[in-house]
Image (cartoon, grey):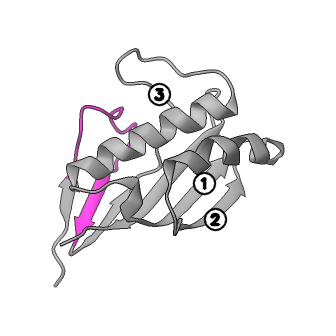
C-alpha cells in the first residue's frame, strides 16, 4: 500500500474546503488547484498576467514543502475563466518553467470571486 503525506504551508492560502494543499505519495507530489490570492496581503491582483504569476508563486510554495521546484513539474492543469486570455496567460506562465517544460492541459472553467486562473501540478521529487 502506498503511503501519502499531507503538505501544508503558510505561504499559500488555507484550503477553502475538505482538501489538502498538497500530497506526497512515493516520489510524486500533487498540488491542489491554487488561485491568485497573496497570502501576505489577502488580496488578489488584477488581470490574467499578474494573477498567473501569483498563482504560480502559490504553487511553488506547496512544491517547496516537498523539496521540489517548478522544474520538477511533470504535468500542469490550468483553468482559465476566459479562454480569450490564453495568450496573455501563456506569456506570464512561460518564464516560470525551463526546458523541457511540463505537459499542460488548459481548460475554460467557471471560476468564482474574480479569480481568472487556477493551476495544479504533478511533480516528481528528485533523489
Position of residue 121 relative to residue 109, above or below, is below
* Residues under numbered marks 1 and 2 in contact, where contact means CB atoms less than 8 Å apart: yes
Position of residue 70 relative to residue 116, above or below, is below
114 on left or right of 63 = right
| Residue 25 in the image, given as x and y percentages of width and height | 23, 71
69 on left or right of 86 = left
- The residue where tag 1 is placed is 78
1 or 2: tag closer to the N-terminus: 1
Q: Quadrant of the C terminus?
A: bottom left
3 or 1: tag closer to the N-terminus: 3
- The residue where tag 3 is placed is 37
| Residue 91 in the image, given as x and y percentages of width and height | 68, 44
3 or 2: tag closer to the N-terminus: 3
Q: Is residue 18 magenta?
A: yes
State how far apart marks 3 and 2 are (Cα). 22 Å
| Residue 1 in the image, given as x and y percentages of width and height | 16, 85
In the current view of this chain or complex, which residue is farthest to the front? 99
First to last magenta residue range: 7-25
Residue drawn at (28%, 57%) of the image: 68
| Residue 5 in the image, given as x and y percentages of width and height | 17, 61
Amino acid at each position: 500500500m502506498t503511503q501519502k503525506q499531507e503538505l501544508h504551508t503558510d505561504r499559500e492560502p488555507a484550503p477553502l474546503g475538505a482538501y489538502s494543499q498538497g500530497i506526497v505519495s512515493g516520489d510524486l507530489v500533487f498540488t491542489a488547484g491554487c488561485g491568485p490570492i497573496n497570502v501576505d496581503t489577502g488580496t488578489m491582483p488584477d488581470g490574467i498576467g499578474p494573477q498567473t504569476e501569483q498563482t504560480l508563486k502559490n504553487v511553488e510554495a506547496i512544491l517547496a514543502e516537498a523539496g521540489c521546484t517548478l522544474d520538477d513539474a511533470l504535468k500542469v492543469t490550468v483553468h482559465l475563466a476566459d479562454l480569450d486570455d490564453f495568450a496573455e496567460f501563456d506569456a506570464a506562465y512561460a518564464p516560470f518553467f525551463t526546458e523541457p517544460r511540463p505537459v499542460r492541459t488548459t481548460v475554460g472553467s467557471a471560476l468564482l470571486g474574480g479569480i481568472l486562473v487556477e493551476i495544479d501540478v504533478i511533480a516528481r521529487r528528485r533523489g
